[in-house]
């Protein structure tokens, strides 16, 4: 909770440019993936308690709302992994600190190159499943 409050407070008061948005997105994506992971493992473990509950959860995942959530998860994972790699490399190599702007731009380009096709393929698959000829089967 205190992490959430400090994130909101700092993000409202600090006026950086790309670096600021990357920092905020890194935090939101890290916490979002962590939240997903906890719910995901809890959901999968429900099979031990009741197969019926587990089946109902799996049915719920096949709804448009969850498909949109999956797109956000895919973007969050790709962004967090690429941006996290940028942060780790720069932390380990102080000699690269003059090239921070280049590193930021490179990270954004890599995220777009990886996320765009992933999201398009996933979205087309979901649109086909919900509205295509075999919808509902
Ligand atoms: C929408 C995307 C995902 C789907 C459809 C999915 C599906 C599944 C399924 C079906 C299992 C059970 C496998 C088995 O027991 O044989 C599983 C387990 C697991 N998944 Fe995912 N997964 C997804 C994303 C992720 C992500 C992003 C992470 C990590 C951040 C993750 C971490 C895990 C872990 C740790 C387990 C083992 C949990 C356990 O044994 O209770 N999954 N996943
Ligand atoms: C290739 C995979 C990953 C890389 C390279 C990576 C890298 C990083 C780095 C470098 C940081 C520190 C950022 C900083 O010092 O400002 C960080 C923070 C964090 N990561 Fe990851 N990470 C990865 C995967 C994950 C996964 C799978 C999760 C969740 C299950 C996760 C959750 C978090 C969280 C919650 C934070 C703290 C965010 C904050 O307080 O600002 N990360 N990550």
Image (cartoon, rainbow, N blue to C red):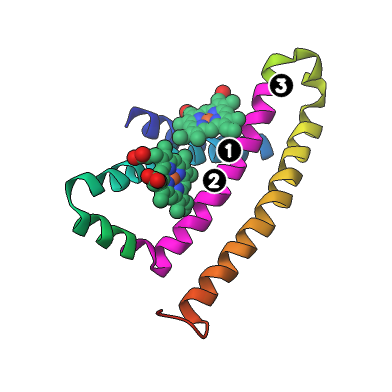
Q: Quadrant for residue 88, please give it.
A: top right
Q: Nearer the viewer, residue 52 or 61?
A: 52
Instruction: Identify the residue at horizontal 76%, vertical 46% (top origin).
Output: 109
Marks 1 and 2, how far apart at CA: 6 Å
Is 62 located above or below residue 47 in the figure?
below
Is 39 located above or below residue 127 in the figure?
above
Boundaries of the magenta span: 60-89
**Could you say whether the residue bearing mark 1 is in a helix, strand or loop?**
helix
Check residue 80 in the rendering and tell me which mark sits there, or answer none. Answer: 1
Say which residue label 3 marks: 90
Is 124 located above or below residue 2 in the figure?
below
Instruction: Specify few, some or many for label 3: CA neighbours under 10 Å numbering under 14, 14-19, or 20 or more.
Output: some
Determine whether the beta carbon of the residue marked 1 sits less than 8 angstroms from the nearest atom of ligand 2: yes
Marks 1 and 3, how far apart at CA: 15 Å
Determine whether the beta carbon of the residue marked 3 sits less than 8 angstroms from the nearest atom of ligand 2: no
Residue 36 visible, this orientation: no
Marks 2 and 3, how far apart at CA: 21 Å
**Could you say whether the residue bearing mark 3 is in a helix, strand or loop?**
helix
123 lies left or right of 99? left
Say which residue label 2 marks: 76
Instruction: Identify the residue at horizontal 55%, vertical 50% (top origin).
Output: 74
Q: Position of residue 18 (x, y in %)?
A: 68, 39
13 lies left or right of 1? right
Q: Position of residue 38 (x, y in %)?
A: 34, 39
Label the magenta part by its dominant secondary structure: helix
Q: Position of residue 16 (x, y in %)?
A: 64, 35
């Amino acid at each position: 909770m205190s992490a959430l409050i400090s994130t909101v407070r700092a993000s409202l008061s600090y006026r950086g440019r790309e670096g600021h948005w990357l920092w905020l997105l890194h935090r939101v994506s890290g916490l979002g993936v962590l939240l997903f992971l906890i719910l995901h493992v809890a959901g999968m473990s429900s099979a031990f308690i009741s197969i019926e509950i587990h089946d109902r959860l799996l049915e719920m995942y096949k709804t448009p709302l969850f498909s949109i959530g999956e797109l956000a998860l895919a973007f969050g994972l790709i962004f967090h992994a690429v941006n996290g790699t940028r942060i780790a490399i720069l932390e380990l190599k102080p000699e690269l600190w003059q090239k921070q702007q280049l590193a930021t731009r490179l990270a954004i380009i890599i995220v777009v190159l990886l996320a765009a096709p992933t999201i398009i393929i996933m979205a087309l698959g979901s649109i086909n499943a919900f509205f295509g000829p075999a919808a509902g089967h």
